[in-house]
Amino acid sequence: QVQLVESGGGLVQAGGSLRLSCAASGRTFGNYGMGWFRQYPGKEREFVSAIRWDGASTSYADSVKGRFTISRDNAKNTVNLQMNSLKPEDTALYYCAVALYYSGRGSQWSYWGQGTQVTVSS
């Protein structure tokens, strides 16, 4: 199985920035994808962003488009999420995920990390 470990979460004031990282370990396959999701307490997990293995395609939720940027480093098997202009509503537990075959937002996400907490204060 693939193991994912998120890092970079923390407390930041509104308007500030955070950079999340996700380190993947395990077997590397072909047309895989990596993505970020977030979950508010008591609510369903929601899509944030995704990226194709070669970076040729990315996808963003409307709520973060223009503020968040996803990137990957294949040599290090990592995916990053640069979060700028953070808002209190961005406060959530952020999860990294892997899809064995990338198809954008609709990918079948097979593996998940444990999550990293992001808290944005007003």
Image (spheres, rainbow, N blue to C red):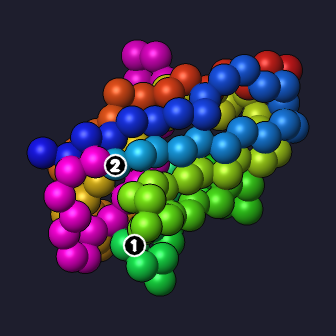
Residue identifier under label 2: 24
Q: Is 28 located above or below residue 80 in the figure?
A: below
Quadrant of residue 85 in the image? Answer: top right
* Residue type (three-letter) at the residue carrying disc 1: Arg
Residue identifier under label 1: 52
Ranked by sequence position, the earlier of labels 1 and 2 is: 2
Q: Which one is in front in this view, the residue at disc 1 or the one at disc 2?
A: 2
Of 75 and 50, nearer the camera is 75
Residue 64's tag is none
17 relative position to 46: left or right: right
Magenta run includes residue 81: no
Residues drawn in magenta:
25-47
Any part of residue 44 in sight = no
Q: What's the residue at 33%, 35% (across, down)?
A: 113
Of 28 and 122, nearer the camera is 28
| Residue 2: image location, x then y, percent | 20, 47
Q: What's the residue at 67%, 51% (across, down)?
A: 82
Q: What's the residue at 17%, 58% (across, down)?
A: 27
| Residue 78: image location, x then y, percent | 45, 55
Point out the image quarter for the C terminus: top right
| Residue 111: image location, x then y, percent | 22, 45
* Residue type (three-letter) at the residue carrying disc 2: Ala
Q: Residue furthest bottom?
A: 56
Count of marks, rendered view: 2
Point out the image quarter for the N terminus: top left
Magenta run includes residue 38: yes
Report the Cα–Cα distance between label 1 and label 2.
15 Å
Any part of residue 48 in sight = yes
29 relative position to 35: left or right: left
